Image (spheres, rainbow, N blue to C red):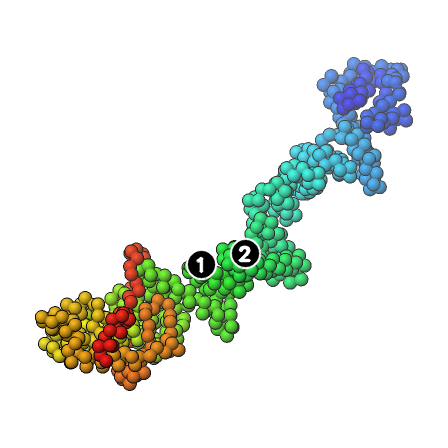
Amino acid sequence: MDDLEINDYLRRALQSADGQFSEISASHPDETESEQGTFLTNRPLTPRQESKSRPTTKNRTTPNEEVDKTELALNKIKWKKASLLATQAFELMECGNYYDANIKLNKAIQMRGDIEEFYVCRAECLLQFCDFKSAILNYNYALSITDKEIGGEWKKRLAFIHYLHSQLLFDEHDYGGALEQVETALKLFPGTFSYQCRKISYLYELKQHKRCFEELQVLFDEHEITAELYVLRARLNRLYGSTTKCFYDVHKALEIDPDNEQAYQICEELERSAEQCKNAAVNYALNGNIMGAVNKINISIETNPTQAEYNIFRGTLYRQLGKYNEAIDDFMITINKINNNEALPLYQSTLRQLVLSYNDFAIECYLKGYFEEAISLLDQAIKRERDEKGFYLNRGDCFKAIGYLSFALADYQQALELDPRDWVIISRISLVHHQYGINEYREKRFIEAEKCFTTAITCNIKVAQYYISRSWSRFMQKNLPGARADLLRGIYLDPDMEEGIMLSARLYPNENIDSILAAKSSQKILKQMKELVVSEQLDHDEVVVSHNTLTYEPIGKENMAQFTEWINSYKKSNNKVKTILDERPDLTFPVPRVISVEKVRTALASDSKSRVRSKLRTEAK
């Protein structure tokens, strides 16, 4: 019997014309309750005994008044019955008999369906049977008919039911349904930490990685940051391949909670994995597979970015590959990781690798014609290592290539002070003085030009061009004996030099080379030159070969006194030259200049061919 049938039954019981039917009691012994919560009765509707005196017309009521009284009496009976059933249901719930309690509440709701507490209680009973959907429907209906402040607590409870339902669906691998339920819970009660964590789990199973990190960022923004939160993000980062972020998250978790076992375990696994990749990189490098080694060491650095040794190793690999920018970056990162602690051996080795990378990069720029960039790189190398002569030598070559001879000479002089017996440096200095002489000659200052050529010859007596150049300057001063003597010395060193043949036509008109060399005066000069050249013995222990050098020879022991005098004169002017170097103009450009590759190795004049030299020696004898 449904609600309408009950109401009709009670109404007919109360509506008796002239009060002929007796009133039905809610607790009549002949009434029973069915399992479905409906009322059954075996008692027939019996009329009352007719009263002796029938009511008069004055006592009769109108039809509308009779209906109002009937409805009022009906509601009173229904409320009493519903209250009794609800009380019985509460007692059954306290005893744990939720099944019978649910039946009682069903009957009470049939009597009075406008009482929201009945729906809430029935929802709690249904939760005991894990009927989450029915419980949610009851709570939703209760919230729809209530306007009390208690509705806030019911919303919180309803959100928790959605959360429990989502866990059940997750266990059944219905990840989409679980996500829908937990999102509903967050709408009802937003900002709940456990709900948000569950949502991240469901998003991960659905492979919605981007939304996972978005929700995780919401957790960091809305809640107090804990070690567990960092561990959660570390695990997500590791699953998605962001091992560097995972490493830093784990260490932040350990800073907050040093005893966190999960964070400590992840940290150990990352360090072990990084070391294994580093060992593999070393094996690749030993076998000549440099790119394979770079790939492995990259994994090590991503897995454990605080290990400075990994950056040093990668920097050396990049240097071997010619990737100097990457190598320099790695060495700078290493120095920053050890906090510029100069007392550490690692700092010294890293600094050495850094300056060598600057030097190698500068040499490559020099070979390609980017002289200004090479100078800037060498400035960085010299700034960090001031006792390396090769850096000054290379920077001097760059200055010489762009025409800044005074700066080039100052760098060569600085290198010579570090190693006064390096023939490479002395050769460079002789070239600079020869270039100075050429500039003076072009300005028709022949006396100054002769002095410069003489200085160049003092530094290196085996360059035929120096003698020919000084011969021209003496010729222009009408010093024919000196000019002829220099011509003969130049021809002795290089008989095939065209410039010497041209000059001989002016100094010895109407004479050929053979007659010039056969003269007694010429033979005397050639003999002296032969003795001077022969006395120059190669002493390889005194020769230092550096990058970007030209031909080299050691200084002769016979000329050490003259050379020492020349060195002392340079030391006296050292302060003046250094001042000029400090005040040199800025050579850097906002945009690198692109120029074609030129010949950059200027060879010194080689010794005379063995065939010609042996002939001259025979004639001198």
Q: Residue at x 64, y 41 (%)?
A: 182
Along the viewing direction, whichever of 515 and 262 lies nearer the viewer: 515
Q: Quadrant of residue 586?
A: bottom left
Image: 498 above or below 127:
below
- Left or right relative to 566: residue 450: left
- Left or right relative to 541: residue 236: right
Residue 502 drawn at (x, y percent): 14, 67
Image: 164 above or below 314:
above
Q: Residue at x 18, y 67 (%)?
A: 499
Quadrant showing the N terminus: top right
How many numbered circles are shown? 2
Q: Which residue is mark 2?
A: 296
Q: Residue at x 56, y 47 (%)?
A: 213
Q: Taking the image as drawn, is residue 318 in sight?
A: yes
Query: Label 1: few (<14), some or many (≥20) within 10 Å?
Result: few
Q: Amino acid at mark 1?
A: Leu
Along the viewing direction, whichever of 452 and 517 lies nearer the viewer: 517
Residue 435 drawn at (x, y percent): 22, 70
Along the viewing direction, whichever of 126 and 55 lies nearer the viewer: 126
Q: Which residue is mark 1?
A: 321
Q: Earlier in the sequence, mark 1 or mark 2?
A: 2
Query: Label 2: few (<14), some or many (≥20) within 10 Å?
Result: many
